[in-house]
Image: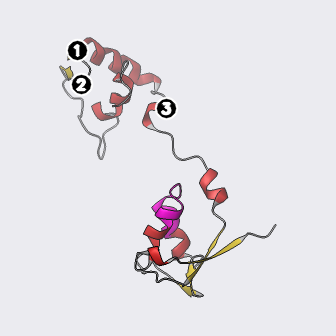
Amino acid sequence: MAIKINHIKIKQEDDGIRVDRWFTRNFPNISFTTIAKLARKGQIRLDSKRVQTSTRVLAEQEIRFPDLTELESKPQNKLRTEMTLHPKHHKLLEMIEQNILYKDEDILAINKVAGLAVQGGTKVGISLDDLLPFLKFDATAR
């Protein structure tokens, strides 16, 4: 099965913008990483020449790139809220829930357990930051 190649003329309103921004305007579901990879591999071309993500496009130039519909439909990485907590961390989460000093719509005050890192890093197995998605309660945002 052959991959469909798109050929699009750059509009006057897009004159002078960078290639990565052109893709962001026209294909908002495609990540910068994907655009950069396609450019690096030479699959994005401007008037038959290879481009970098920082290359500026001019009106009436022709941009060529592979069909992006398959890339758009690929599922992105799971959000932290969709992740599951490792069974060995359930007890730690229960301890943190017992040490909640105050909570309302905007604030969650915790008496942090000694030895628990606030943020993840090198050689840090679990941190408070990793557990926050599981402490949302009824809130919609973190």
Residue 7 is left or right of residue 113, and the answer is right
Q: How far is the residue under mark 3 from the one under mark 1?
A: 24 Å
Give the residue displayed 46% in from the left and 79% down from the top. Answer: 52
How many numbered marks are there?
Answer: 3
Which quarter of the rendering shows the N terminus? bottom right
Which one is earlier in the sequence, the residue at label 1 or at label 2? 1
Image disc number at residue 25 = none
Element class at badge 2: loop
Q: Nearer the viewer, residue 70 or 25?
A: 25
Reply above or below: 42 against 130. Answer: below
Give the residue furthest to the right.
Answer: 1
User: At label 3, which amino acid type do we have?
Assistant: Glu
User: At label 2, which amino acid type do we have?
Assistant: Asp
Q: Which residue is mark 1?
A: 99
Q: How far is the residue under mark 2 from the one under mark 3?
A: 22 Å
Q: Which residue is mark 2?
A: 106
Which quarter of the rendering shows the C terminus? top left
- Name the dominant secondary structure of the magenta segment: helix
Task: Single out the mark in the foreground, 1 or 2.
Answer: 2
Give the residue displayed 46% in from the left and 38% down from the top. Answer: 79
Q: Decide: few, some or many residues near mark 1? Use Cα within 10 Å; few <14, some 14-19, many ≥20.
A: some
Which one is earlier in the sequence, the residue at label 2 or at label 3? 3
Element class at badge 3: helix
- Span of residues in magenta: 23-36
Residue 94 is left or right of residue 28, and the answer is left
Residue 24 screen position, x and y as percent:
47, 63
